[in-house]
Amino acid sequence: MLAQLFGAVLAGAVNLAVWSTTISHFEAAQDLAGGRTTMPGCVRTAMLFGQYFPNPGIFPQGVESRPAPVVTALHAMLVEALGTFVLVLVIFLLIDRCNTAVHPAVVPPAIGATVAALIAVFAPQSQAGWNPARDLGPRIVAWAAGWGASALPGPGGGFWIYLVGPCVGSLLAGAVFFGALRISDDECENEKCK
């Protein structure tokens, strides 16, 4: 977990280094008064580092233009849990050593296609994080780079959903796979003998 978090912090730092000039130009062009410190406008640039709900990109004038909350924290957490559940369950099913129906060369593209499909469905709701380190690491970089409260804890303190949702979803996927779908080693060997 620490290695993933460290890698995500490094990735966030690279993201900042690559995009810092463009971010500054965007902030100036959009006349984001206060730049990185004034919510909710600063979320439009902070979302380059972490997820937000609903996806700020679906509001042309920014999240401040929405009339009322369209996605609650609980709803976003459940979306994160569901997306993670589906992704982890598909991975378990694809890499199961007793699964002889799928050629090993198909596994990586199938996982990638699953991620793409899930993003297409869930990104407008929660921006589809599905990995606590992938969200938290870059948020730490954004916080240190001046986004402050828009990065951590985020608008309404919502960063927690990207930690809790994926943990809940992956644990449920493991319970379903190992509790109901996985073929035991003995059964697997018996099937291969037939």
Image: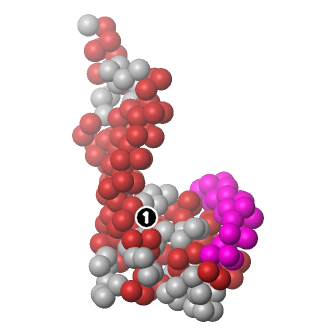
User: Which residue, as the protein is rendered here, is positioned at the far front?
Assistant: 29
Residue 172 in view in this figure:
yes
**Which residue is nearer to you in this view: 51 or 188?**
51
Residue drawn at (39%, 61%) of the image: 123
Q: Specify whether 65 is left or right of 11.
A: left
Where in the figure is residue 21, as x and y percent of width and height?
73, 70
Report which quarter residue 25 is drawn in.
Answer: bottom right
Q: Between residue 29 and residue 81, name the one nearer to us.
A: 29
Asked if 91 appears above or below 54 in the picture, the reply is above
Q: Place residue 37 in its image quadrant.
A: bottom right
Q: Nearer the viewer, residue 19 or 2?
A: 19
For label 1, the SS is loop
Which residue extends farthest top?
194
153 or 125, which is in the foreground? 125
Q: Would you name the residue on which mark 1 appears?
A: 127
What is the span of residues highlighted in magenta in the rendered image? 1-27
